Image (cartoon, helix red, strand yellow):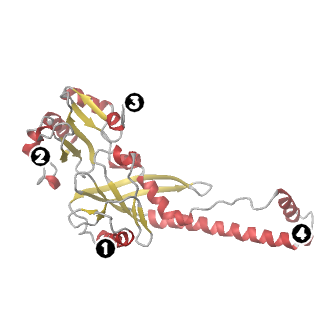
Amino acid sequence: MLVHPIVASEVSESTVVMSKVYPLVRELVHKYKLKVMGKRISNWNPSEEYSHFYLARDDGFVVGTVGINREGQYTFRTGIRPKDRGRTREDKMTYMATKVSSMMRSIEKNKLLPENTVEVMNYLGHTREVVKYAIKEYDYVGKNVLVNGAELHDILKVVFSYQDLKSLSSDSIVKFKKVLDEYNQVDETRQAKLDVVKEKFDKPIKFIAYDDTKTFLKGAMKLSVSISETFNLDRVNVDEVECKRVRTFMDDTDIAPLMAMFKVKLQQTDSSTSFVGEEGFFPECGEKYVDELGVVKVDTDGWRHDNYPSKPQWIFFV
């Protein structure tokens, strides 16, 4: 079977077989167990036989696009391995070959297909933004120097018994107490930050994505989050991902009510927001975070959006 079941009603097996790029599709399906996940019309020839096809593994995650260019060369559009040279980003991400065998060697040699979905998610880096949103309330955790050198000298004399506390002026004592209160507040903020990270990311977080295939990717991922010695966000790594292609996510009892409330929130702030999908609950907007719902729509504008073949938009639930 060449076509993923989720898009079988839009892309027939015969459409793939009759296309100019079929020989390359056939080899990729055979060697890497890929499936056609959708198609798009070529930007230089509207005929179906010149269509480009999105390819995905069984979990539905698109790993590349194949097509034919004006010169009759096979093309493979990767999402993770840009060439060293290219006039545009699209050019740098697109590999070409006259023969199927040459293209297959190029795909293998340059590792144009990701090892797994985990590799892609770490490459795109969206999850770092998700964690930053979740802990932004506790973002400031630094202990800045709030006393000058002379004041510090005076308090050190007291600490090491060079002089009595009474030798300090009342204004100095008040200031030192205020500094101590602020430092204590920083400690509480640091602990709260660690507590949020532990509470939200010790367990898998769900996500949905919508892309040019006009279907959804629904799943969950396990993250490992580390905080630096200065209590700043040091590293966010995707350790595990499970996902599948679906027509709708509104049959998920966890996601459906959150997305319904998310839609209401967005419509209240911007009535022009458009929504996609069969039920119309996935917003086509920029980045949004609704704290009380724990819903994060990450910013996918720019290179991270245009870089990936199917141009997915992501929503995470934390």
Q: Which residue is mark 4?
A: 168
Comparing 220 with 123, the one in front is 123
Q: Is residue 192 above or below residue 217?
A: below
Q: Which residue is mark 1?
A: 257
Q: In the image, what residue type sits under mark 1?
A: Pro
Gap in angstroms between the C-alphas marked 3 and 4: 65 Å
Gap in angstroms between the C-alphas marked 2 and 4: 84 Å
Comparing 257 with 58, the one in front is 257
Determine the secondary structure under disc 4: loop
Q: Residue 162: name its quadrant.
A: bottom right
User: Mark 1 or mark 3, which has the lower sequence index?
Assistant: 3
Q: Can residue 246 be seen here?
A: yes
Q: Residue at x 70, y 68 (%)?
A: 182
The crowd level at tag 3 (other Cα within 10 Å; few <14, some 14-19, many 20+) is few
Left or right side of 134 for 245: left
- Dividing the image into 4 quarters, which one contains the C terminus? bottom left
Q: Residue at x 12, y 49 (%)?
A: 11
Task: Kindly indicate whether the residue at mark 1 contacts the one at mark 2 (C-beta within 8 angstroms).
Answer: no
Comparing 291 with 120, the one in front is 291
